Amino acid sequence: MDEQFIREAVENFTRPWPQRRGIESIDRNAAVVLVKVPLNQLSDALAEKAIESQRNVMGSEIEVSGAFVFAYQLVGHPWSIMISGDLSYPSILESSEFALLSKQLEQTVIMLLVSDSAGEISYDLFEGGELVEYFRGSDGELTDDSNKYGIQSQRYLLFPYPDELEEDEDSEAQQTAYFWSRRRQVTAEEIGNIWDFARQLMLDYDAFDPAIDSSYLLREYSLRAGRYQVQNPGFTLVFGYEKDGRSQEVTSVPDLVRVDYFRFGK
């Protein structure tokens, strides 16, 4: 592998966490809620509805059961983040709750969904208790669910990879998107690529999804009810191998202000 390519990959992988913005990785299936408040404010709001709450659980053992969420904040970032566990989906992560949360905290809430297996990405943007922007994008066909908000989104057919189109093939769309906004109108050309469009929204709002989920914090990808230690192991990039087979790797550990735990039901 080219040495310059490796060097640039390592530099990008280890860039300072406080400076990162956008979406760290789309190679996963995740639901992420970002709230533009300090962690204490978000955690206070969650604690009002949770049946159990624990602050600053990093390094501690917690009892995982039922529907739960972690809330955390990265050093140098204005947004706090909510992620759910995999055992059960808590009602606090329903879309109706995001509107209420944006009104209660008087700040912006972004619900971001990423699925590499389905080839889809989406976001819902809330401010002042209302949905202000809606986006759904897919590398294939896509079901529009905007009716749950009582809105009528616009459908877009996108061709983000023109070099891959054959001259003699039908002009079938490479991507499909649905968009609605109270504030702006966009063309298919302005959307361009669904992945870039969602990432740009995050950049415009100075927001960052670090790809930290419950599996990362608990170091377990098939969660079951039980006790787990909350950890921050870091992300590891393998960029080569020694002659003896040992991997050449570098690890980047996110700078977390704190991690809080909330349980909402059995």
Image (cartoon, rainbow, N blue to C red):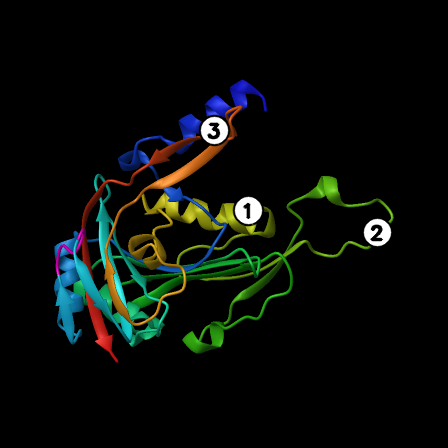
Residue tagged by mark 3?
9
In x, y percent, where is residue 150?
A: 43, 77
Q: Quadrant of the C terminus?
A: bottom left
Q: Tell me the residue at 50%/71% (across/down).
A: 152
Q: Few, some or many C-alpha atoms within 10 Å of disc 2 (few <14, some 14-19, many ≥20)?
A: few
Q: Amino acid at mark 2?
A: Glu
- Secondary structure found at label 2: loop
Q: Nearer the viewer, mark 1 or mark 2?
A: 2
Residue tagged by mark 2?
169
Q: Is residue 191 highlighted in magenta?
A: no
Q: Nearer the viewer, mark 1 or mark 3?
A: 3
Q: Tell me the residue at 27%/69% (across/down).
A: 226
Q: How many marks overall?
A: 3
Q: Is residue 57 highlighted in magenta?
A: yes
Q: Few, some or many C-alpha atoms within 10 Å of disc 1 (few <14, some 14-19, many ≥20)?
A: few
In the figure, residue 89 lies in which quadrant? bottom left
Q: Amino acid at mark 3?
A: Ala
Residue tagged by mark 1?
190
Q: Earlier in the sequence, mark 1 or mark 2?
A: 2
Judge whether 255 appears above or below 111 on screen.
above
Q: CA distance from mark 2 to mark 3?
A: 36 Å
